[in-house]
Image: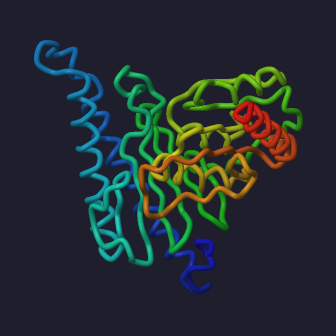
């Protein structure tokens, strides 16, 4: 069920606009909380550790985010990562959020960290908002609608050769999947935040996203943005990737790409799985 088919024609535009607006407000509120604590250890090096800062920033951002969403949608469930913090798990709609995706970037005063918010219906994410506060970049995506960066519509790239593509990835156990892509000529960029990576795919800055161990709160928001921009997402078996609206610590592989590269990426993933299986059997 897409966002737009979930409501009647007469009210869909108003409902969608109000929901997106509230999600954006929540993301910006969380982002402001992160920016307020971006580098206090330098002011008090003997008293405050980076871990203290990250923990406080994450909690402050979560508090701001939840306050906006629970006020706007008191009947919805709200998850911060895998923890249910508002409502009941069996409600029709659930917000799955990560107030700080890209902890290492935040701790190092980088700019590639994000607030990630996804709205799920009963089975799948239908709205995604990803906000990079250090860059003031805002991405939105609506299932059945479009994807936007800072209000302007975006689409995936049309590059048609894996050899000239760019793959972004946060983590690849053993590095074998990415090495195989490099051997085929693809450029590989390591970037921690899955939400940021999926938004890069949505804008054409990247052509492939590989996440060995994705979690719903990391990828759901960016996935809606990427798919609304035209991307396709799958697991290594080639099945459609759908994150769980009841988040857990069970990790799942995520492979996302453009329509132009889908066939080549599927072929590569299939060959990779066969090689891994054969190596294990040996």
In the rendered image, which quarter is residue 270 located in?
Answer: top right
In the rendered image, which quarter is residue 90 located in?
Answer: bottom left
Q: Is residue 274 above or below residue 216?
A: above
Where the C terminus falls, by quadrant? top right
Residue sticking out furthest to the front: 282
Q: Is residue 46 above or below residue 259?
A: above
Left or right: residue 177 versus residue 224 is right
Left or right: residue 259 versus residue 88 is right
Point 38% across, 55% down: residue: 25
Residue sticking out furthest to the left: 47
Point 32% across, 49% down: residue: 29
Left or right: residue 100 versus residue 57 is right
Count of numbered labels shown in the rendering: 0
User: x, y percentage for residue 182?
Assistant: 76, 22
Point 57% across, 50% down: residue: 151
Q: Is residue 204 above or below residue 2?
A: above
Q: Nearer the viewer, residue 46 or 151?
A: 46
In the rendered image, which quarter is residue 58 located in?
Answer: top left
Point 87% across, 46% down: residue: 263
User: x, y percentage for residue 109?
Assistant: 37, 21
Q: Is residue 224 above or below residue 72?
A: above
Left or right: residue 255 versus residue 185 is left
Q: Nearer the viewer, residue 215 or 204?
A: 215
User: x, y percentage for residue 127?
Assistant: 54, 62
Where the N terminus falls, by quadrant? bottom right
- Colour theme: rainbow
User: x, y percentage for residue 262?
Assistant: 82, 46
């Amino acid at each position: 069920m897409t966002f737009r088919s979930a409501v009647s024609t007469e009210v869909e535009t108003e409902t969608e606009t109000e929901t997106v607006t509230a999600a954006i407000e929540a993301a910006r509120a969380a982002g402001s909380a992160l920016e307020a604590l971006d580098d206090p250890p330098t002011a008090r090096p003997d008293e405050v550790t980076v871990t203290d800062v990250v923990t406080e920033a994450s909690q402050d951002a979560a508090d701001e985010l939840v306050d906006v969403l629970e006020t706007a949608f008191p009947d919805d469930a709200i998850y911060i990562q895998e923890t249910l913090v508002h409502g009941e798990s069996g409600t029709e709609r659930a917000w799955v959020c990560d107030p700080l995706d890209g902890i290492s970037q935040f701790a190092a005063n980088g700019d590639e960290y994000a607030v990630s918010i996804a709205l799920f219906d009963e089975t799948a994410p239908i709205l995604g908002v990803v906000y990079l506060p250090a860059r003031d970049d805002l991405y939105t995506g609506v299932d059945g609608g479009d994807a936007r960066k800072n209000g302007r519509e975006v689409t995936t790239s049309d590059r048609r050769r894996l050899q000239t593509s760019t793959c972004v990835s946060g983590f690849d156990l053993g590095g074998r999947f990415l090495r195989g892509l490099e051997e085929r000529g693809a450029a590989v960029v390591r970037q921690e935040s899955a939400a940021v990576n999926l938004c890069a795919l949505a804008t054409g800055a990247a052509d492939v996203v590989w996440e060995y161990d994705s979690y719903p709160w990391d990828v759901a928001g960016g996935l809606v943005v990427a798919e609304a921009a035209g991307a396709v997402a799958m697991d290594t078996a080639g099945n459609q990737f759908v994150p769980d609206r009841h988040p857990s610590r069970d990790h799942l592989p995520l492979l996302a790409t453009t329509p132009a590269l889908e066939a080549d990426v599927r072929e590569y993933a299939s060959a990779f799985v066969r090689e891994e299986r054969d190596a294990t059997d040996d």
